[in-house]
Image (spheres, rainbow, N blue to C red):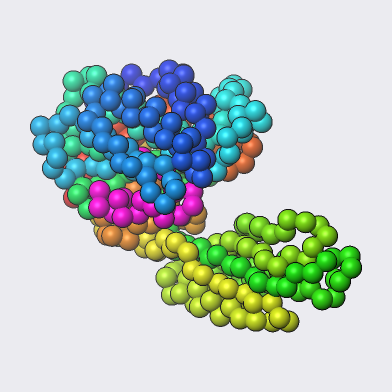
Amino acid sequence: MNALNLPFDSNDMLAGLRAWIECESPTFDAAAVDRMMDLAARDMAEAGAVIDRIPGRMGFGGSVRARFPHPDFGKPGILILGHMDTVHPVGTLAKLPFRREGEICYGPGIMDMKGGNYLCLEAVRQILRAGLTTPLPVTILFTPDEEVGTPATRDLIEAEAARNRFILIPEPARPDGGAVIGRYAIARFNLRTHGRPSHAGWALSEGRSAIAAMARKVLQIEAMTGPDCTFSVGVIRAGQWVNCVAAECEAEVLSMAKRQEDLDRGVAAMLALAGEEDEVVLEVHRGVTRPVWAPDQPGTMALYGLARRIAAEIGFDLTAASAGGGSDGNFTGAMGLPTLDSIGVRGKGLHTLNEHIVVESLAERARLVAGLLMHLPEGAS
Protein backbone atom coordinates (compact mmCIF):
# COMPACT_ATOMS: atom_id res chain seq x y z
CA MET A 1 0.00 0.00 0.00
CA ASN A 2 1.20 3.50 -0.86
CA ALA A 3 1.56 5.54 2.34
CA LEU A 4 -0.26 8.43 0.69
CA ASN A 5 -3.34 6.22 0.36
CA LEU A 6 -3.56 5.43 4.06
CA PRO A 7 -7.01 6.25 5.51
CA PHE A 8 -6.25 9.57 7.16
CA ASP A 9 -9.43 11.35 8.24
CA SER A 10 -9.21 14.90 9.59
CA ASN A 11 -12.47 14.58 11.51
CA ASP A 12 -11.33 11.44 13.30
CA MET A 13 -7.96 13.02 14.02
CA LEU A 14 -9.61 16.12 15.44
CA ALA A 15 -11.68 13.98 17.78
CA GLY A 16 -8.50 12.35 19.10
CA LEU A 17 -6.66 15.66 19.31
CA ARG A 18 -9.37 17.20 21.49
CA ALA A 19 -8.14 15.45 24.63
CA TRP A 20 -4.65 16.86 24.07
CA ILE A 21 -5.98 20.40 23.66
CA GLU A 22 -8.17 20.17 26.73
CA CYS A 23 -5.20 19.01 28.78
CA GLU A 24 -3.72 22.47 29.34
CA SER A 25 0.07 22.47 29.67
CA PRO A 26 1.72 25.88 30.18
CA THR A 27 5.49 25.74 30.43
CA PHE A 28 5.77 27.00 33.99
CA ASP A 29 3.26 24.49 35.40
CA ALA A 30 5.34 21.32 35.58
CA ALA A 31 2.48 19.21 36.92
CA ALA A 32 0.22 20.29 34.06
CA VAL A 33 2.90 19.52 31.47
CA ASP A 34 3.45 16.11 33.06
CA ARG A 35 -0.27 15.38 32.77
CA MET A 36 -0.01 16.13 29.07
CA MET A 37 3.04 13.89 28.75
CA ASP A 38 1.11 11.09 30.49
CA LEU A 39 -1.68 11.43 27.94
CA ALA A 40 0.70 11.42 24.98
CA ALA A 41 2.70 8.52 26.42
CA ARG A 42 -0.45 6.43 26.78
CA ASP A 43 -1.55 7.15 23.21
CA MET A 44 1.89 6.27 21.84
CA ALA A 45 2.14 3.12 23.95
CA GLU A 46 -1.26 2.05 22.65
CA ALA A 47 0.13 2.47 19.13
CA GLY A 48 2.90 0.03 20.00
CA ALA A 49 5.79 2.24 21.08
CA VAL A 50 8.33 1.52 23.78
CA ILE A 51 7.98 4.49 26.14
CA ASP A 52 10.73 6.18 28.15
CA ARG A 53 9.72 8.82 30.67
CA ILE A 54 12.60 11.23 31.27
CA PRO A 55 12.36 13.26 34.49
CA GLY A 56 12.31 17.04 34.31
CA ARG A 57 14.76 19.41 35.90
CA MET A 58 15.12 23.14 36.65
CA GLY A 59 11.48 23.18 37.73
CA PHE A 60 10.13 22.04 34.36
CA GLY A 61 8.09 18.97 33.53
CA GLY A 62 9.51 15.76 32.13
CA SER A 63 9.94 14.50 28.58
CA VAL A 64 8.62 11.46 26.72
CA ARG A 65 10.52 9.38 24.20
CA ALA A 66 8.63 6.82 22.12
CA ARG A 67 10.47 4.28 19.97
CA PHE A 68 8.31 2.33 17.56
CA PRO A 69 8.70 -1.34 16.54
CA HIS A 70 11.21 -1.93 13.76
CA PRO A 71 13.63 -4.68 12.62
CA ASP A 72 16.49 -2.20 13.19
CA PHE A 73 15.18 -0.98 16.54
CA GLY A 74 17.83 1.13 18.28
CA LYS A 75 19.78 1.97 15.14
CA PRO A 76 19.99 5.53 13.70
CA GLY A 77 16.75 6.53 12.03
CA ILE A 78 14.20 9.36 12.00
CA LEU A 79 13.57 11.60 14.99
CA ILE A 80 10.25 13.44 15.21
CA LEU A 81 10.79 16.29 17.64
CA GLY A 82 8.05 18.35 19.27
CA HIS A 83 7.21 20.27 22.43
CA MET A 84 4.10 19.87 24.56
CA ASP A 85 4.35 23.10 26.55
CA THR A 86 2.24 26.09 25.54
CA VAL A 87 2.18 29.80 26.35
CA HIS A 88 -1.43 29.59 27.58
CA PRO A 89 -1.95 29.46 31.37
CA VAL A 90 -4.30 26.95 32.95
CA GLY A 91 -7.80 28.37 32.66
CA THR A 92 -7.39 29.62 29.08
CA LEU A 93 -9.98 27.06 27.97
CA ALA A 94 -12.62 29.28 29.54
CA LYS A 95 -11.70 32.02 27.06
CA LEU A 96 -10.49 29.86 24.18
CA PRO A 97 -12.45 26.61 24.36
CA PHE A 98 -11.90 23.77 21.96
CA ARG A 99 -14.51 24.48 19.32
CA ARG A 100 -15.01 23.89 15.64
CA GLU A 101 -16.51 26.47 13.33
CA GLY A 102 -16.74 25.05 9.83
CA GLU A 103 -13.26 24.23 8.60
CA ILE A 104 -11.55 26.02 11.50
CA CYS A 105 -10.91 24.63 14.97
CA TYR A 106 -9.82 26.70 17.96
CA GLY A 107 -8.00 25.83 21.17
CA PRO A 108 -4.95 26.69 23.28
CA GLY A 109 -1.85 25.09 21.78
CA ILE A 110 -3.73 23.53 18.87
CA MET A 111 -1.48 25.28 16.36
CA ASP A 112 1.69 25.56 18.44
CA MET A 113 2.16 22.69 18.40
CA LYS A 114 -0.12 19.91 19.65
CA GLY A 115 -1.85 19.62 16.28
CA GLY A 116 1.45 18.88 14.56
CA ASN A 117 2.52 16.46 17.28
CA TYR A 118 -0.74 14.55 17.06
CA LEU A 119 -0.70 14.21 13.28
CA CYS A 120 2.80 12.74 13.46
CA LEU A 121 1.59 10.10 15.88
CA GLU A 122 -1.33 9.41 13.55
CA ALA A 123 1.08 9.00 10.63
CA VAL A 124 3.04 6.36 12.52
CA ARG A 125 -0.12 4.72 13.80
CA GLN A 126 -1.62 4.34 10.32
CA ILE A 127 1.64 2.91 8.94
CA LEU A 128 1.71 0.29 11.69
CA ARG A 129 -1.98 -0.56 11.28
CA ALA A 130 -1.45 -1.16 7.57
CA GLY A 131 1.35 -3.62 8.35
CA LEU A 132 3.93 -1.46 6.62
CA THR A 133 7.55 -1.13 7.70
CA THR A 134 9.42 2.13 7.38
CA PRO A 135 12.94 1.87 5.91
CA LEU A 136 14.35 3.49 9.07
CA PRO A 137 13.29 3.19 12.72
CA VAL A 138 11.17 6.06 14.06
CA THR A 139 11.49 7.85 17.39
CA ILE A 140 9.25 10.61 18.77
CA LEU A 141 10.58 12.93 21.48
CA PHE A 142 8.23 15.37 23.21
CA THR A 143 9.80 18.02 25.47
CA PRO A 144 8.41 20.49 28.06
CA ASP A 145 10.24 23.82 27.75
CA GLU A 146 10.54 25.05 24.15
CA GLU A 147 8.45 28.16 24.74
CA VAL A 148 11.08 29.54 27.11
CA GLY A 149 14.10 28.68 24.98
CA THR A 150 14.60 25.00 25.91
CA PRO A 151 16.89 25.62 28.90
CA ALA A 152 16.32 22.19 30.47
CA THR A 153 16.23 19.84 27.50
CA ARG A 154 18.65 21.18 24.90
CA ASP A 155 21.25 18.58 25.87
CA LEU A 156 18.63 15.83 25.71
CA ILE A 157 17.48 16.97 22.26
CA GLU A 158 21.02 17.18 20.90
CA ALA A 159 21.94 13.76 22.29
CA GLU A 160 18.86 12.12 20.80
CA ALA A 161 19.32 13.93 17.49
CA ALA A 162 22.92 12.74 17.26
CA ARG A 163 21.64 9.16 17.42
CA ASN A 164 19.48 9.68 14.33
CA ARG A 165 19.90 10.50 10.64
CA PHE A 166 16.94 12.79 9.90
CA ILE A 167 14.96 15.25 12.03
CA LEU A 168 11.31 16.15 11.39
CA ILE A 169 9.76 18.98 13.40
CA PRO A 170 5.98 19.50 13.14
CA GLU A 171 5.94 23.12 14.23
CA PRO A 172 3.10 24.99 12.49
CA ALA A 173 3.53 25.75 8.82
CA ARG A 174 4.57 29.18 7.62
CA PRO A 175 1.76 31.57 6.56
CA ASP A 176 1.87 30.26 2.98
CA GLY A 177 1.82 26.66 4.20
CA GLY A 178 5.54 26.21 3.62
CA ALA A 179 8.24 24.46 5.59
CA VAL A 180 11.29 25.91 7.34
CA ILE A 181 14.85 25.02 6.27
CA GLY A 182 16.76 27.46 8.49
CA ARG A 183 16.15 29.70 11.49
CA TYR A 184 17.51 32.95 12.84
CA ALA A 185 19.61 33.13 15.99
CA ILE A 186 17.87 34.13 19.21
CA ALA A 187 19.23 35.35 22.53
CA ARG A 188 17.37 36.08 25.76
CA PHE A 189 18.43 38.49 28.48
CA ASN A 190 17.41 38.98 32.10
CA LEU A 191 17.60 42.56 33.36
CA ARG A 192 17.31 43.91 36.89
CA THR A 193 17.41 47.48 38.14
CA HIS A 194 18.28 48.26 41.76
CA GLY A 195 16.98 51.60 43.03
CA ARG A 196 16.35 53.08 46.47
CA PRO A 197 13.01 52.76 48.25
CA SER A 198 11.16 55.59 49.91
CA HIS A 199 7.60 56.52 50.84
CA ALA A 200 5.99 57.70 47.61
CA GLY A 201 3.86 60.33 49.32
CA TRP A 202 5.97 61.49 52.25
CA ALA A 203 9.52 61.29 50.82
CA LEU A 204 9.27 60.78 47.06
CA SER A 205 12.43 62.73 46.26
CA GLU A 206 14.51 60.52 48.53
CA GLY A 207 13.77 57.41 46.43
CA ARG A 208 15.22 56.19 43.17
CA SER A 209 12.62 54.27 41.21
CA ALA A 210 13.77 51.01 39.72
CA ILE A 211 10.59 50.99 37.63
CA ALA A 212 11.21 54.41 36.10
CA ALA A 213 14.80 53.50 35.32
CA MET A 214 13.70 50.26 33.67
CA ALA A 215 11.05 52.09 31.65
CA ARG A 216 13.71 54.38 30.21
CA LYS A 217 15.87 51.35 29.35
CA VAL A 218 12.94 49.62 27.65
CA LEU A 219 12.61 52.55 25.24
CA GLN A 220 16.36 52.54 24.65
CA ILE A 221 16.49 48.80 24.05
CA GLU A 222 13.60 48.64 21.61
CA ALA A 223 15.05 51.63 19.72
CA MET A 224 18.12 49.46 19.04
CA THR A 225 16.06 47.34 16.64
CA GLY A 226 17.34 47.45 13.06
CA PRO A 227 17.08 45.40 9.87
CA ASP A 228 19.74 42.91 11.01
CA CYS A 229 18.90 42.48 14.68
CA THR A 230 15.69 43.04 16.64
CA PHE A 231 15.07 43.68 20.35
CA SER A 232 11.80 43.33 22.24
CA VAL A 233 10.93 43.53 25.93
CA GLY A 234 8.25 40.97 26.71
CA VAL A 235 8.19 40.73 30.51
CA ILE A 236 8.41 43.28 33.34
CA ARG A 237 7.92 42.55 37.05
CA ALA A 238 8.11 45.15 39.82
CA GLY A 239 6.38 46.81 42.70
CA GLN A 240 4.31 45.65 45.63
CA TRP A 241 2.84 48.80 47.19
CA VAL A 242 1.76 51.82 45.21
CA ASN A 243 2.83 54.09 48.08
CA CYS A 244 6.42 52.87 47.97
CA VAL A 245 9.06 53.81 45.41
CA ALA A 246 10.09 50.48 43.90
CA ALA A 247 13.62 49.37 44.77
CA GLU A 248 13.81 46.55 42.21
CA CYS A 249 12.47 45.82 38.75
CA GLU A 250 13.03 42.81 36.48
CA ALA A 251 12.61 42.52 32.72
CA GLU A 252 13.18 39.93 30.02
CA VAL A 253 14.40 40.80 26.54
CA LEU A 254 14.45 38.79 23.31
CA SER A 255 16.88 39.52 20.50
CA MET A 256 16.77 37.90 17.05
CA ALA A 257 19.18 38.08 14.11
CA LYS A 258 19.51 36.37 10.75
CA ARG A 259 23.26 35.88 11.11
CA GLN A 260 25.34 34.87 14.09
CA GLU A 261 27.65 37.88 13.70
CA ASP A 262 24.63 40.22 13.89
CA LEU A 263 23.43 38.49 17.04
CA ASP A 264 26.92 38.72 18.54
CA ARG A 265 26.86 42.49 18.02
CA GLY A 266 23.41 42.63 19.57
CA VAL A 267 24.59 40.65 22.58
CA ALA A 268 27.53 43.03 23.04
CA ALA A 269 25.18 46.04 22.84
CA MET A 270 22.88 44.56 25.47
CA LEU A 271 25.68 43.68 27.87
CA ALA A 272 27.11 47.19 27.47
CA LEU A 273 23.93 48.64 29.00
CA ALA A 274 24.91 47.38 32.43
CA GLY A 275 26.05 50.00 34.90
CA GLU A 276 24.82 52.77 37.19
CA GLU A 277 22.86 55.88 36.29
CA ASP A 278 21.30 58.38 38.70
CA GLU A 279 22.04 56.02 41.61
CA VAL A 280 20.17 53.12 39.99
CA VAL A 281 22.18 50.03 39.05
CA LEU A 282 21.25 47.98 35.98
CA GLU A 283 22.32 44.34 35.76
CA VAL A 284 22.19 42.53 32.41
CA HIS A 285 22.57 38.76 32.26
CA ARG A 286 22.55 36.71 29.07
CA GLY A 287 20.04 33.87 29.13
CA VAL A 288 19.47 30.91 26.83
CA THR A 289 20.50 31.25 23.20
CA ARG A 290 19.38 29.49 20.04
CA PRO A 291 22.18 29.29 17.45
CA VAL A 292 21.72 30.19 13.81
CA TRP A 293 20.51 27.32 11.71
CA ALA A 294 21.98 28.30 8.37
CA PRO A 295 19.77 27.62 5.34
CA ASP A 296 20.75 25.69 2.22
CA GLN A 297 22.62 22.89 4.00
CA PRO A 298 22.89 19.99 1.52
CA GLY A 299 21.30 17.37 3.77
CA THR A 300 18.39 19.61 4.68
CA MET A 301 17.83 20.67 1.08
CA ALA A 302 17.78 17.03 -0.05
CA LEU A 303 15.25 16.27 2.69
CA TYR A 304 13.15 19.22 1.59
CA GLY A 305 13.36 18.13 -2.03
CA LEU A 306 11.89 14.75 -1.10
CA ALA A 307 9.15 16.42 0.95
CA ARG A 308 8.23 18.71 -1.91
CA ARG A 309 7.91 15.77 -4.30
CA ILE A 310 5.68 13.95 -1.83
CA ALA A 311 3.57 17.08 -1.31
CA ALA A 312 3.11 17.39 -5.06
CA GLU A 313 1.74 13.84 -5.14
CA ILE A 314 -0.68 14.78 -2.36
CA GLY A 315 -1.75 17.85 -4.30
CA PHE A 316 -0.04 20.92 -2.90
CA ASP A 317 3.19 22.84 -3.38
CA LEU A 318 5.42 22.84 -0.32
CA THR A 319 7.53 26.00 -0.32
CA ALA A 320 10.47 26.50 2.01
CA ALA A 321 12.40 29.37 3.56
CA SER A 322 14.49 30.40 6.53
CA ALA A 323 12.40 31.90 9.31
CA GLY A 324 12.43 33.87 12.51
CA GLY A 325 10.83 32.58 15.66
CA GLY A 326 13.05 29.96 17.22
CA SER A 327 12.37 26.25 17.49
CA ASP A 328 14.33 23.23 18.56
CA GLY A 329 15.28 22.96 14.90
CA ASN A 330 17.86 25.66 15.67
CA PHE A 331 19.79 23.04 17.62
CA THR A 332 19.55 20.11 15.22
CA GLY A 333 20.11 22.32 12.18
CA ALA A 334 23.17 23.91 13.79
CA MET A 335 24.48 20.39 14.38
CA GLY A 336 24.46 19.91 10.61
CA LEU A 337 21.76 17.22 10.74
CA PRO A 338 19.20 17.14 7.90
CA THR A 339 16.25 18.90 9.51
CA LEU A 340 12.84 19.80 8.10
CA ASP A 341 10.85 22.14 10.31
CA SER A 342 7.31 23.55 10.24
CA ILE A 343 5.67 20.61 8.51
CA GLY A 344 2.78 20.70 10.97
CA VAL A 345 -0.71 22.14 10.73
CA ARG A 346 -1.80 25.23 8.83
CA GLY A 347 -3.48 27.90 10.92
CA LYS A 348 -3.28 31.35 12.45
CA GLY A 349 -3.16 33.15 15.77
CA LEU A 350 -0.56 31.09 17.61
CA HIS A 351 0.17 32.46 21.10
CA THR A 352 -3.13 34.40 21.08
CA LEU A 353 -6.75 33.85 22.12
CA ASN A 354 -7.52 33.39 18.43
CA GLU A 355 -5.27 30.36 17.95
CA HIS A 356 -6.79 27.98 15.40
CA ILE A 357 -6.02 25.47 12.68
CA VAL A 358 -7.44 24.54 9.29
CA VAL A 359 -8.95 21.14 10.04
CA GLU A 360 -8.18 19.61 6.64
CA SER A 361 -4.48 20.27 7.21
CA LEU A 362 -4.44 17.44 9.78
CA ALA A 363 -4.87 14.73 7.14
CA GLU A 364 -2.86 16.68 4.56
CA ARG A 365 0.21 16.94 6.77
CA ALA A 366 -0.19 13.43 8.22
CA ARG A 367 0.07 12.13 4.65
CA LEU A 368 3.19 14.23 4.12
CA VAL A 369 4.81 12.86 7.28
CA ALA A 370 3.80 9.29 6.42
CA GLY A 371 5.29 9.73 2.95
CA LEU A 372 8.55 10.94 4.44
CA LEU A 373 8.67 8.09 6.94
CA MET A 374 8.11 5.54 4.17
CA HIS A 375 10.63 7.06 1.73
CA LEU A 376 13.56 8.17 3.88
CA PRO A 377 16.47 7.83 3.24
CA GLU A 378 15.51 7.48 -0.45
CA GLY A 379 16.45 10.67 -2.29
CA ALA A 380 17.61 12.45 0.87
CA SER A 381 20.91 10.81 1.74
User: Which residues, given as a range, are shown in magenta?
Assistant: 140-160
- Residue 332 counted in the magenta span: no
Q: Residue 377, position in %: x, y? A: 19, 43
**Measuring 49% from the left and 57% from the top, which residue is drawn there?**
324
Task: Establish if 372 lies above or below 228.
Answer: above
Q: Residue furthest left?
A: 71
**Measuring 59% from the left and 23% from the top, which residue is drawn there?**
99
Q: Residue 190, position in %: x, y? A: 55, 65
Using the image as rendered, state which of residue 259 and residue 309 is in the foreground. Answer: 259
Q: Residue 100, position in %: x, y? A: 58, 22
Using the image as rendered, state which of residue 50 and residue 68 is in the foreground. Answer: 50
**Measuring 52% from the left and 32% from the top, which residue is drawn there?**
24
Q: Is residue 367 left or right of residue 22?
A: left
Q: Is residue 349 left or right of residue 214?
A: left
Task: Establish if 87 lies above or below 197.
Answer: above
Whether residue 141 is visible to the viewer of this picture, yes or no, is no
**Measuring 43% from the left and 31% from the top, which residue is drawn there?**
35
Task: Establish if 294 lies above or below 328.
Answer: below
